[in-house]
Image (cartoon, rainbow, N blue to C red):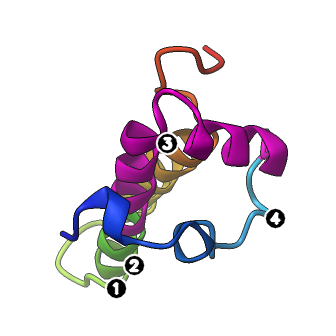
Amino acid sequence: MPHPEEVPFEELLAFDTSGLDDWDEGRALAALGGRHGTLYRNHLLIARRLDAWAEAESGRTDTDARYRAGYTQALQDMAAFLRQTYYLPEGPD
């Protein structure tokens, strides 16, 4: 995984926000430029990995469909929480 500071913020924020219940671009930009900017950048990189993992899980055929759907949803939810700044020291709880 690249170092968080090496990835341009435009690339980090290049994801679909339509499914995020609490997306606030201003809050995200403030987090990127704030005291915990490096941590938030890392969270955004982790969220990308979680998206890829969810995509891979959704295509599996060796597990029960309900299990697979729940597992995929959990990965997507974690990615959403990371993107919405929930796990920053000063983020919403």
In the rendered image, the vertical position of residue 20 relative to residue 34, given as above or below? below
Percent x, y of residue 82: 49, 42
Indicate the quadrant containing the C terminus: top left, top right, bottom left or bottom right: top right
Please name the predominant secondary structure of the magenta segment in the image. helix
C-alpha span from label 2 to label 4: 18 Å
Q: Is residue 44 magenta?
A: yes
The answer to whether marks 2 and 4 mark residues whose Cβ atoms lie closer than 8 Å is no
Q: Which mark is residue 45?
A: none
The residue stretch that appears in magenta: 21-48
Could you say which is closer to the camera, residue 40 or residue 65? 40
Residue, disc 4: 18
The answer to whether marks 2 and 1 mark residues whose Cβ atoms lie closer than 8 Å is yes
Q: Which mark is residue 59?
A: 1
Q: Residues within 10 Å of mark 4 (few under 14, many from 20)?
A: few
Q: Residues within 10 Å of mark 1 (few under 14, many from 20)?
A: few
Q: Is residue 30 magenta?
A: yes
Nearer the camera: disc 3 or disc 2: 3
Residue, disc 2: 55
C-alpha span from label 4 to label 1: 22 Å
Q: Secondary structure at mark 3?
A: helix
Residue, disc 3: 82
Nearer the camera: disc 2 or disc 4: 4
Nearer the camera: disc 1 or disc 3: 3
Mark sitting earlier along the chain (1/3):
1
The answer to whether marks 4 and 3 mark residues whose Cβ atoms lie closer than 8 Å is no
Nearer the camera: disc 2 or disc 1: 2
Nearer the camera: disc 4 or disc 1: 4
